[in-house]
Image (spheres, grey):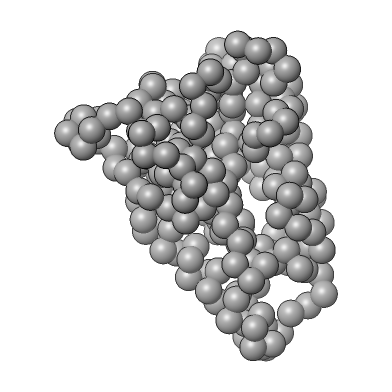
Amino acid sequence: MPETMNQVRFIDLQLMDYKEAWDFQQEQQNRLIQAKTTGTSSGSGEMPCLIFVEHPHVYTLGKSGKENNLLINDKFLASIQATYYKTDRGGDITYHGPGQIVGYPVFDLDQLKTGVKGYISRLEDAIIRTLETYGIPTERLPGATGVWIDAGKQGSQRKICAIGVKVSRGITMHGFALNVNTNLNYFNHINPCGFTDKGVTSMEKELGHLVDFEKVKSQLRSNIASDFGFTLI
């Protein structure tokens, strides 16, 4: 593998079923792992990728999550046209749906010369910078991944972006979910990320109006490329 990650493919899957997108990113990760372990990447054309997608209503549970953080049964799940998957990422339960930017970076941490904590921190930085341009001040919450508003105010803490990743042979998958124009009512049916004392919010809720979704996507992908030091192709 090259010593540095200079170029990354950007793939926008638009609206796609969760399992279909999961299979797609798993395929990308497997290709990178194969190229890395065999030392054939330079001639194979394989390169890291940044995947953006929206999902139909779905709840996903991380490998260390608790199933009782899903507060509804299968019948109610079907009535709200949502699905449910147990996944192999870190973190607990979260919701994905229309109006939310889900990002799946398939990156090589060895090329980035960073560990998992550093990788997550740089993702958070890019998201924080993106939200700053909209006048939404955000920060980290000690002991919890993701991007938060009023992180230091007990009772007012609300998450605007969740993060949960998986790393195999130094290659990442899964990623983040930024609430832009998301229907927050769906979060009422779970304990988001396992928390019962913290809220969830969106750019739309904080600003009081719908946000240009494509503009946020463009700004976010540019900030990710800038923070990680690569060019998107």
Front residue (pair 5, 117)? 117
- The correct choice, above or below, for 151 with respect to 194 in the image is above
Identify the image quadrant of residue 188.
top left
Classify the position of the N terminus by image quarter.
Answer: bottom right
| Residue 126 appears in the figure | no
- The correct choice, above or below, for 113 with respect to 69 in the image is below
- The correct choice, above or below, for 13 with respect to 233 in the image is above
Image spot of residue 133 (x, y percent): 74, 28
Q: How many marks?
A: 0
Residue under the image location 55 percent in, 76 percent down: 31
Image spot of residue 228 (x, y percent): 78, 54
Identify the image quadrant of residue 198.
top right
Residue under the image location 71 percent in, 54 percent down: 116
Image spot of residue 160 (x, y percent): 59, 28
Image spot of residue 43 (x, y percent): 67, 88
| Residue 121 appears in the figure | yes
Q: Is residue 169 left or right of residue 68?
A: right
Residue under the image location 57 percent in, 57 percent down: 166
Classify the position of the C terminus by image quarter.
Answer: bottom right
- The correct choice, above or below, for 163 with respect to 111 in the image is above
Q: Is residue 231 left or right of residue 95?
A: right
